[in-house]
């Protein structure tokens, strides 16, 4: 938005659109909602599906109205977002992780500057699966990826277009302070699914805990975010294995409790099998002062750098060896924790938020010529 008479620029009116399954509430927020809340700026309103509990109180939120048309569920969501867009008349719309929704907005509101923020691999998303679809997206809107790995995925197969990287952020100012004396705990915190490697974590602990009787192992998480996560076949298999290994399963916990656990545990393990688009759990663990063990899949090395130790979830002896090395060496744990805190500062919201705001201002300035946003 141009500066008014007097030269003082007003904050942009940004409407940030969550995916329909995300809930903008402390007790229900998934990874995207947490990030959106963390990065919200003055003048921004977040819109999304109505949560069952109270939404965040410090950021304006509007539920997407349920439009009574013979559409699919996603069609009704698109119609509700369009209604809110006409109501709020924002300077810029930022759509998270739904290329199909961003495309629909670009067709109905071509005059409104539009950014699509991708948190996951677009090659498996509706309206982003083919090179032709991704090229069309990059011509119609600003495409933002949360990691270099994700940007490379978007541009695979000869896709052309300007794609910007704005990494996820961590608000170090509100993290619980690292405990001065860390508990002898090896912690897994995340979705309890095979892709996250939690079964490998349990298998490693089954070997390690008998050798190190002063240590404990814990799992925080469920199949999904939220207190009503289903009991899956995978969990039915994992629970008795964890019990036999001596691993405590705490189930789903609100995000604040997860961070508290990370700030006390000596070691946090992020053994993902799938290609993590970013690796937020590893970044949070480093910010909370834990020594981190992670895999090299997807964007995880770009987040952890040299501040973590690496092991594959499908190399059980290797995972056991790396964990045992940390469990046996307090000095190494302290050095890795210090390196992790330093690495986390590069992703502090105090660093990333101004970059996002500058990107928004530039997008409004050059719209509709999104090619001008090309990375140097």
Image: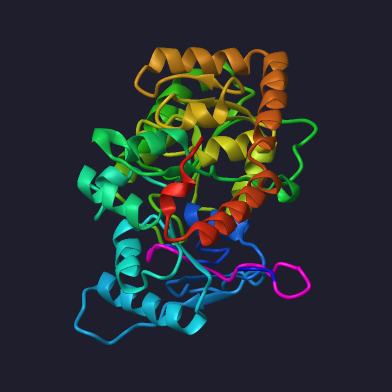
Q: Residue drawn 28% across and 70% down? A: 74
Q: Position of residue 117 (x, y in %)?
A: 44, 53
Is residue 254 visible in this depiction of the protein?
no
Give residue 103's quadrant in the image.
bottom left
Task: Say if the magenta span includes residue 219.
Answer: no
Which of 44 and 206 lies nearest the eye of the viewer? Answer: 44
> Please, which residue is most extreme toward the front here?
5
Residue 117's place in the image compared with 164, above or below, is below
Residue 244's place in the image compared with 255, above or below, is above
Is residue 179 visible in this depiction of the protein?
yes
Give residue 207's quadrant in the image.
top left
Which of 277 and 372 lies nearest the eye of the viewer? Answer: 372
Q: Position of residue 255 (x, y in %)?
A: 58, 53
253 displayed left or right of 313: right
Q: Position of residue 273 (x, y in %)?
A: 36, 30
The region drawn magenta spans 4-21
Q: Position of residue 356 (x, y in %)?
A: 59, 52
Which of 261 and 347 lies nearest the eye of the viewer? Answer: 347
Q: How many marks?
A: 0
Residue 263's place in the image compared with 353, above or below, is above
């Amino acid at each position: 938005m141009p500066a008014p008479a007097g030269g003082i620029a007003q904050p942009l009116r940004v409407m940030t659109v969550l995916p329909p399954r995300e809930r903008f509430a402390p007790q229900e927020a998934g990874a995207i909602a947490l990030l959106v809340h963390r990065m919200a700026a003055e003048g921004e309103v977040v819109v999304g599906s109505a949560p069952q509990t109270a939404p965040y109180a410090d950021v304006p939120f509007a539920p997407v109205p349920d439009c009574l048309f013979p559409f699919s569920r996603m069609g009704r969501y698109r119609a509700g977002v369009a209604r809110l867009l006409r109501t709020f008349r924002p300077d810029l719309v930022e759509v998270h992780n739904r290329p199909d929704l961003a495309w629909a907005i670009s067709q109905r509101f071509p005059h409104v500057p539009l950014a699509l923020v991708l948190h996951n691999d677009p090659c498996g998303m509706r309206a982003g699966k083919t090179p032709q679809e991704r090229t069309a997206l990059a011509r119609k809107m600003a495409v933002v990826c949360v990691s270099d790995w994700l940007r490379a995925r978007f541009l695979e197969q000869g896709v052309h277009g300007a794609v910007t990287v704005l990494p996820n952020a961590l608000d170090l100012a509100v993290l619980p302070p690292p405990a001065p004396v860390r508990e002898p705990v090896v912690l897994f915190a995340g979705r309890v699914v095979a892709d996250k490697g939690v079964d490998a974590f349990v298998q490693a602990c089954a070997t390690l805990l008998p050798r190190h009787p002063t240590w404990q192992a814990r799992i925080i998480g469920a199949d999904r975010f939220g207190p009503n996560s289903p009991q899956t076949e995978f969990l039915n298999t994992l629970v008795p294995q964890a019990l036999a290994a001596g691993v405590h399963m705490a189930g789903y916990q609100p995000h604040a409790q997860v961070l508290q656990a990370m700030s006390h545990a000596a070691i946090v393990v992020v053994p993902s099998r799938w290609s993590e688009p970013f690796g937020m759990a590893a970044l949070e663990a480093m910010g909370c002062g834990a020594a981190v063990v992670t895999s090299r899949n997807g964007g995880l090395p770009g987040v952890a750098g040299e501040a973590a130790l690496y092991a594959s979830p499908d190399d059980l002896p290797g995972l056991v060896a790396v964990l045992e090395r940390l469990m046996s060496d307090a000095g190494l744990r302290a050095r890795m924790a210090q390196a992790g805190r330093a690495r986390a500062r590069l992703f502090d919201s105090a660093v990333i938020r101004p970059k996002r705001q500058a990107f928004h201002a530039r997008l409004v300035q050059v719209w509709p010529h999104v090619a001008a946003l090309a990375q140097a």
